[in-house]
Image (cartoon, helix red, strand yellow):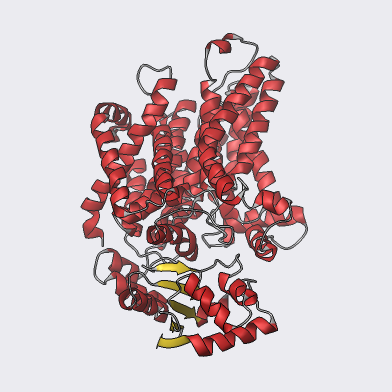
Amino acid sequence: MILYFPLHFLLLSIIVLGSLALGLKIFSPLTSHLSLPPIALPAGLSLGLALTGLAVLALGQMGLIYPGSLWAIILLLGFSVFWNRRQILDLLKNFSLKNFSLPFKVIVGLALFLLVASAYRPETFFDALVYHLGLPGVFLNEHHTLPAFNHFFLPMPLLQEMLVTLGLGTGGEAVAKMLAVVLGLIAPLTLYIWGKELRDAKTGELAALLFLTTPIIFRNICRLSTEPALAGPLLLGLYFAFKEKVGTDTTFFKKVVSVPTFYSGLFMGIAFSFKYFAGLWCLTLFLFLLFRFIFHKSYLLPTTYYLLSFITGGFAAALPWLLRNLVALGDPLYPYITLALGRHYHPEGWASFQWEAQHWHPGPRVISDIMVILKGSFWDFTGTYFIGPSYLLLLPLALYGILKARSASHLPSTIYYLLSFTGLNWLIGLAVTHYLRYLSPLLAPLALLNSYGVSLFLQQDEQKAATITKGKIFLKTLIVFFLVYHIGWLLQGFRRSTDQKVIFGLISRQDFLRQKFGYYHQAIEWINNNTPQDARILLLGETRPYRFRRRLVYATVHDRHPLADWIEKASDPVELSKKFETEKITHLFHHTAEEARIWGYPMFKLSPRGGGLWEEFRKSYLKKIAINESVAIYKVQGYN
């Protein structure tokens, strides 16, 4: 409950500030500033948290995910905070509360309170239980992070999950979720700094508020989806990409790397480390930089040098994830190269994932692309889709302000680049998927463009004074309405009394979970309380490993269940029993209600022979020891 917040906040501060100190060690030597610029805060956080995540990955690849090793990382981060305390304090002076407006402080304060409160609500979101918390739970039980070809999510880039593993293994679920909150706050922080640099503090504040309070962003920060975390390094990659001066200057030979483009590549590589989907934006930014250098008639050698700096930075961040898959699976981008070669072990599962991930809206493509944006803006109120109306309704006014500034030659080149990149990637993204959650990181540069354009609109010259004044009043009213509307959505997620009670300790976590999951959670409690510590549980009909405190064998809905392969390869029940013994399976957890819900996925399809063999095995080797209306638990007999 939230009464433990002081202790959790202390642990969180050590992780975050220690990571910041590490990140600044990378950032400081490459910057030409005598004192660190404000952008060093989000840049240092992103770099440092990536390093901390890689430290957890290194432990996992060596099979050393234990409480002691995780606390050793915390200890080292604590030393890092102490050693670099002056540098951290000097940097944080740029962000004194007196520098922010009262509305900004009130809205951000409310958002932070709700985000912290959400960390004390036991997680129930399906994707988090399977993936974002589920995998860290598996890593803590198995003590390693080795990828496997027959688990859909294990070979994915898992930077956020590494940090969640650190939080979960030291401070529990609340600290793990607050680390995801910190990752989600890097993008609003970057928006504030970039908006302030481009125009003024109000521009930065509006951009940060628009993005942070967007329903699809705020809701997905609360439930640990990776997209809000991915938006931070994406923005930083764009920030540094557009900082590089281009032309025919040859003094670049005096430098080891082109610092801005190296940083740009580094942050895009970090974005890739959160999710493969970010690779699309890495590629488009590379092509965008290439076009930009050609357009400005830069010499061939400088252009090559700049682009190699970008590639070097990108590979430096992404290489650990590529090597992890290359060594274990022979495919650095598993499953993509394997699929291209026609060697994927379960193409039906991949096809089901593709269908699910694309979420195509019905109708002709151009019309369906428009409809999915309208749907996400006005009437689909789910966390998967709902952006809210603010972006779409502010955009025409923002573009008007930008075009007016362009005609007066007052527009910085960064806005051209940002507008082109954002528009292009929305078009490409909608051609790839209609799953708006996947595209939601692109709302970050769009929030900056909206805020910048609105700022220009509000500062027009007082020609046609009456018309301009009415337009400004209307726009200010619209902005206030959108922010109030967003605040309503922030509060809406905490309207349920049971959520409020568990957050403040009025009901226990276990009682809350029993109310939410009923017989399913009771069965998990039975497993955790009544099986030996060295038990290994086979999950059937259940894909959510989170909250099991035993080693598991299970499959996601996009995998072929290992049990199905064991059955088809066995000649008789005796041979299948030997396979259970080899795998050290002691119990079977059969969630019949969930099995019926996910039956359409091709994860446990048996031949007639296999079905008969399985029935024989169940009768001879499985003893039912616990049962309720949703779950049956069996003990494996014959060898243990």
The quarter of the rendered structure image containing the C terminus is bottom left
Q: What residue is at 60 percent from the left and 30 percent from the top?
A: 311
Whether residue 101 is visible, yes or no, is no
Q: Is residue 583 shown left or right of residue 547?
A: right
Identify the residue at horizontal 60%, vertical 65% (top origin): 559
Q: In x, y percent, where is residue 220? A: 47, 55
Residue farthest along the right direction in this orientation: 364
Q: Position of residue 84 (x, y in %)?
A: 27, 29
Question: Is residue 273 visible in the rendered structure shown here?
Answer: yes
Q: Is residue 20 above or below residue 443?
A: above
Total label count? 0
Picture coordinates of residue 584, whole percent (x, y) = 45, 71
Quadrant of the frame with the N terminus: bottom left
Q: Quadrant of residue 290?
A: top right
Q: Quadrant of residue 376?
A: bottom right
Nearer the observer, 557 or 439:
557
Is 330 on the left or on the right of 67, as rendered? right
Image point 38% across, 41% down: which residue?
A: 52
Tell me where residue 320 appears, x and y as whole percent: 51, 41
Which is nearer the eye, 163 or 221?
163
Identity of the residue drawn at 68% across and 18% down = 296
